[in-house]
Image (cartoon, rainbow, N blue to C red):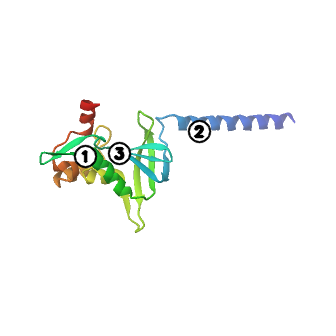
Amino acid sequence: MKKLSLILFSTFSLFLLSLNAHSEDLSDPQKKWTSYVNGNAKVVDGDTIVIKNLRIRLFGIDAPEKNQICKINSKAYNCGKSSTEALERFIDGHRVLCTWKNLDVYGRPLAFCSVSRIDGSTIFLNGMMVTTGNAVAYKKYSKKYLDAEKSARENREGIWQGEFDLPWDWRRKYK
């Protein structure tokens, strides 16, 4: 009977230790764990969406702010609104899948997000926003979209058609 009690106590202790170790891994932001969410997305702006009440930041890109003004041929336009509308068009009512490993300083997932279309094609939203000139590569945090940005700049897509402040410079000036 004493042996059985010792075995049960040991097994229970090991179970509690493994449970505690697992929960520490998930709560430690420095650990590499991956989460995901999919569902209908509400577009907040050109680099932020909400799925199931979870505010998600698209990783590696920075889009013009909602009220940011840019110019094409000296004519002002709201490039922040244009960027938001572009993301809405890419999503086009389809379910969005986002995966992430890390959170930003505001606790938002820094995610790679995609939309699978009925025709079998997939749109990778982060890269598409940069490729079409509706966002820029956020070089401070990632080099992943440098080629997409170069292509947009060379082809004069979106904001690259005219003059604009980089989103981080605009925030520093006006917020």
The picture places residue 40, in percent across and down from the top left corner, at: 47, 54
Of 33 and 38, nearer the camera is: 38
**Toward which corner of the image does residue 23 lie, by quadrant?**
top right
Is 165 positioned to the left or the right of 145 in the image? Answer: left
Mark 1 and mark 2 in contact (Cβ < 8 Å)? no
**Marked residue nearer the N-terminal end (2 or 3):** 2
**Marked residue nearer the N-terminal end (1 or 3):** 3
Q: Which residue is mark 2?
A: 22
Neighbour tally class for label 1: few under 14, some 14-19, many 20 plus, Cα within 10 Å: many
- Which element type, helix, strand or loop, lies under badge 2? helix
Which is in the foreground here, disc 2 or disc 1? 1
Query: Marks 2 and 3, how far apart in space?
Result: 32 Å
The reply to whether residue 152 is in sight is yes
Query: Marks 1 and 3, how far apart in space?
Result: 13 Å
The picture places residue 80, in percent across and down from the top left corner, at: 28, 44
- Which element type, helix, strand or loop, lies under badge 3? loop
The picture places residue 11, in percent across and down from the top left corner, at: 73, 38
Amino acid type at mark 3: Asp
Of 44 and 172, nearer the camera is: 44
Residue at the extreme bottom of the image, as rendered: 119
Q: Which residue is mark 1?
A: 79
Neighbour tally class for label 3: few under 14, some 14-19, many 20 plus, Cα within 10 Å: many
Amino acid type at mark 2: His
Q: Which residue is mark 3?
A: 47
Residue at the extreme left of the image, as rendered: 73
- Which element type, helix, strand or loop, lies under badge 1? helix
